[in-house]
Amino acid sequence: MESESSKRSLKRYKGGEETKEESPPEDDDYVPYVPVKERKKQKLTKLGRISQVKADADLKAKSSSENECNDEEEEDLQSVARKSNISLLSQHTELKKVAQAKKESAFEKQLKEEEKILESIAEKTALMGVAELARGIQYEDPIKTSWTPPRCILNMPRDYPDILRGKLSITVEGEDVPLPIPSFNAMKFPKGILVGLQKKGIKQPSPIQIQGLPTVLSGRDMIGIAFTGSGKTLVFVLPIVVFSLEQELKMPFLPNEGPFGLIVCPSRELAKQILETVEHFSDCLAQHGMPRIKSCLIIGGTPVNQSLESINRGVHIIVATPGRLMDMLDKKMIKLDVCRYLCMDEADRMIDMGFEEDIRTIFSYFKVISIYTTFIYFIYFFYVNY
């Protein structure tokens, strides 16, 4: 019996040990596993709370400053109201003056802030060469040309330009704006140019030509805003052709020399139209015994060899689109060392199409661009009928 009871007790003891071994150990430092996804969520929530706390602090600081301003306003109003010996009408006028002064100060502050913003934008977005932007160089004097207005225009009364501009709805801005000239003969164009105008059926200049042609012929930079069909193409084509002719008569262009004038436009079709106009007046000049003005078209979709052949012979005027022109400048196929006239037709459209950086790159290939180069920008003006 004793042996059986001892066996049973041993069995119970062994059974107790077995049950103790099977139960998991109790550990106070145990940390449950958290998946990576959950941990990221927890971090994001923590960051969100921190940013919310910061935003609340900023709002409190802002509200405290606003409260201080409001307290100052209340003090001013109370100081006026405390004057018991003043009538209500005079108190009302004083309160009005205080409110008006505060409005003016706030308005002036806003104007100053806007001026600072505009200055910073103008510095960043000025279309100049990279070297000039880095040095902060600004030029004030325009280039000097051999063209001068005729005496009949110079001897006109002082109010003549304003009367003519008002009559033709011409708006001008700037300093020492050149006088408007209402006829092509008075602009001193060569006979070949006048014959070319007659062949095109152009007898009288349009408003943009009356003011624009004397401006460009004087060597001044110009931004022209005109609607479609206003004759703006002639405003930059005729002066570039005339000045190229002048250079050719003084010293003929050698092979690989040029261009003297560069016209940049956003589309191939527009470039082809401008080149046709340039070649028309060049042919008319050649028919009247003048040297031929050589022109070249540089656009995408045409073989580069054709453009290189005309450049190698020496070219006076290049009409180009930004992409192909920049590519050829980068490969040193074209040099702008002697280029003195730059025109950007539809400049606003080029900027909108994202060519701003390309134009800056083109400007960087000029040498001392702002001293010797005349800029001509043309922007379309659209009529909207409601």
Image (cartoon, grey):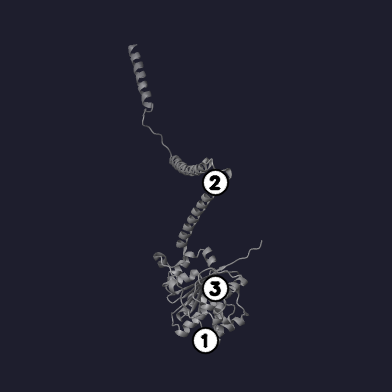
Where does residue 256 sit, x and y in percent of width and height?
Answer: 43, 80
Mark 1 and mark 3: Cα distance apart in space = 25 Å
Disc 1 to disc 3: CB gap under 8 Å: no
Any mark on residue 290, and which?
A: 1
Residue topped by disc 2: 95
Disc 1 residue type? Met
Q: Nearer the viewer, mark 1 or mark 2?
A: 2
Which is more N-terminal, label 3 or label 1? Answer: 3
- SS at mark 3 in the image: helix
Disc 2 residue type? Leu
Any mark on residue 146, and which?
A: none
In the visual, does 28 lie left or right of 193?
A: left
**Would residue 46 be visible to someone looking at this image?**
yes
Residue topped by disc 3: 271
Mark 3 and mark 2: Cα distance apart in space = 65 Å
Asked if residue 101 is positioned above or below residue 308 in the image, the reply reads: above
Which is more N-terminal, label 2 or label 3? Answer: 2
